[in-house]
Image: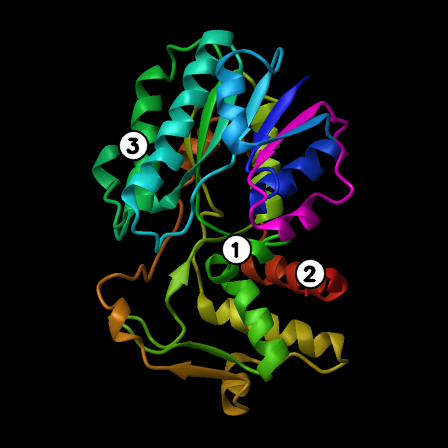
Amino acid sequence: MRIVITGAAGFIGSNLVHALNAKGYDQLILVDDFTQANKYKHLLGARYIDYFDKDQFYTLFEEGKLGSIDVVFHEGACSDTMEHNGRLMMETNYRCSKRLLDRCIKTGARLIYASSAATYGGGSEFIEKPEFEKPLNIYGYSKLAFDNVVRPLLGNNESQIVGFRYFNVYGPREHHKERMASVAFHHFNQFKKEGGVKLFGEYQSYKAGQQARDFIHVDDVVAVNLWFLDHPDKSGIFNLGTGRAQPFNDVASTVINTFRGMNQEKSLPLTDLVDLSLLEYIPFPEALVGKYQSFTQANLEHLRQSGCDHSFMDVQSGTKKYVQWLLEHAEYD
């Protein structure tokens, strides 16, 4: 099986490459942009047959110059939610995706692609239906625009098409994302450098640190992608989170207590972490008022109806696993 992975040196893409290798797939064609050169570390040890810069790939793929392709995992995107260049977002997240889709339909290749929970915006329900989709930025809109092209094809296209609306993904190989990296990554570095973690204080009806997100470990994201690879008869647009919102307090306290455990110190409850100033709350920034999602939680009904019964890690298990990985991989410092 010959598989293309776009965004292959990125966060989810690189984890997917290593997982495919572990399952015996090595006829991989990787696509990315190495302008940010340190991403090469994510692919150390990976097996693949070719690599193309994204500016070369799309034309070569459209012209059929890459040979027969069975599956395309499309993880490449501009995922900076603070990017205000709408032309860049639409070209990268919509037009490139549409070019891939058109070629896949023509050749019968399967397409499994990354959408985003940003398609929902600031809503309180997260269900894969238009009435719940109200993106707050051009990033969310660009992802929704492509989802809306895919929708009429579902059930009518002979080959598999799957879109995943990723929620708050965290885990190994996200260093290059810098300010867009996960909360767990930033908490880890903050505690390592300063000996404490800072969280937002009260906001709207949420008490300090109690704003909650659906945090999902990248290993779980990859596992679901591979489940659909193994089930080519399943198509659709699916939420991909844990289905369980947990507060930022859970992430911060797990990071701190994992560090403490590595130093042979006992875990402490949240109240003690606050009393010892290991966890502090800062005033909610005025600049984020009205622009901040205080709650996200994937509705997994549609995913479960597909037959995918994968069991997801909770924040405590996933964050502990991630912190231990970060401590063991000093080459990323």
Foreground: disc 3 or disc 1: 1
Lower position in the chain sequence, tag 3 or tag 1? 3
Lower position in the chain sequence, tag 2 or tag 3? 3
Residue type marked 2: Tyr
Which of the 4 quarters of the picture holds residue 77? top left
The residue to which callout 3 is attached is 145
Q: Are marks 2 and 1 in contact (CB under 8 Å)?
A: no
Using the rendered image of the protein, determine whether residue 254 is visible from the camera's viewpoint.
Answer: no
Residue 309 higher or lower than 137, as above or below: above
Circle 3: element type: helix
The residue to which callout 1 is attached is 177
Using the rendered image of the protein, determine whether residue 267 is visible from the camera's viewpoint.
Answer: yes
The residue to which callout 2 is attached is 332
Segment colored magenta: 22-47
Could you classify mark 2 by the number of other residues whose Cα lies within 10 Å: few (under 14), some (14-19), or many (20 or more)? some
Could you classify mark 3 by the number of other residues whose Cα lies within 10 Å: few (under 14), some (14-19), or many (20 or more)? some
Residue type marked 1: Lys
Could you classify mark 1 by the number of other residues whose Cα lies within 10 Å: few (under 14), some (14-19), or many (20 or more)? some
Lower position in the chain sequence, tag 2 or tag 1? 1
